[in-house]
Image (cartoon, grey):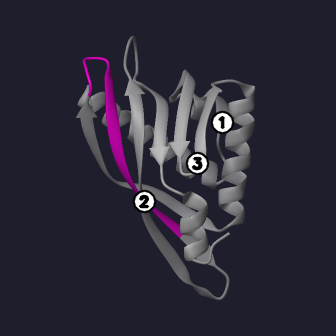
């Protein structure tokens, strides 16, 4: 399952880059997610479904990333912790680069821990745990 999960995140990274460029198909973007998901951060816990509302939220999220100057989002590393034969946690280390007018670019490293399930076909993300993105951006003078 390790190789398939790594391929999932390579694809996720490519889709993220296309979305930052304003060239994403939201059906393709949301295809990496399971039919339902859970997300946890210091802001609280959210549950959702992989539906039109998710597509709209993803479009708005990518538009916000572009608006605050996000130039690049790339994966530095993926470490996989198996749970059982169908589930794992993918610890993904990301690097983001932000452009700021009249200043040098800002690089921010952060980690997100994704819950992944593989039943039939490709693995799917059904949850994630992340830090306080807004606080990190604020500390770096972004947003």
Count how many numbered circles sit on residues in the image. 3
SS for callout 1: loop
* Left or right of 122 on screen, residue 142: right
Q: Distance between the residues labelled 2 and 3?
A: 20 Å
| Above or below, 12 relative to 141 | above
- Residue 130, percent across and down? 48, 49
Q: Which mark is residue 18?
A: 3
| Above or below, 29 relative to 139 | above
Quadrant housing residue 20: bottom right
* Left or right of 26 on screen, residue 119: left
Q: Name the residue under label 1.
A: 25
Magenta residues, as a range?
A: 83-97
Nearest the camera: 65 or 25?
65
* Circle nearer the N terminus (2, 1): 1
SS for callout 3: helix
Q: Which mark is residue 110?
A: 2
Contact between labelled residues 3 and 2, with CB atoms less than 8 Å apart:
no
* Left or right of 76 on screen, residue 44: right
Quadrant housing residue 82: top left
- Residue 45, percent across and down? 58, 38
| Closer to viewer: mark 2 or mark 3 | 2
Task: Assess disc 1: are there few (<14), some (14-19) or many (≥20) residues with their C-alpha within 10 Å of its C-alpha.
Answer: few
The single residue placed furthest to the bottom in the displayed view is 102
């Amino acid at each position: 399952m390790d190789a398939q999960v790594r391929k999932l995140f390579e694809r996720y990274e490519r889709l993220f880059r296309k979305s930052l460029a304003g060239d994403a198909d939201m059906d393709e973007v949301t295809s990496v997610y399971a039919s339902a998901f859970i997300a946890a951060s210091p802001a609280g816990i959210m549950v959702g479904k992989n539906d039109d509302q998710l597509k709209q939220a993803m479009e708005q999220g990518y538009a916000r990333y572009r608006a605050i100057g996000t130039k690049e989002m790339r994966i530095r590393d993926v470490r996989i912790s198996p749970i059982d034969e169908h589930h794992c946690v993918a610890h993904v280390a990301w690097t983001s680069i932000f452009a700021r007018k009249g200043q040098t670019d800002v690089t921010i490293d952060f980690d997100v821990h994704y819950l992944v399930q593989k039943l039939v076909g490709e693995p799917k993300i059904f949850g994630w745990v992340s830090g306080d993105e807004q606080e990190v951006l604020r500390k770096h003078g972004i947003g």
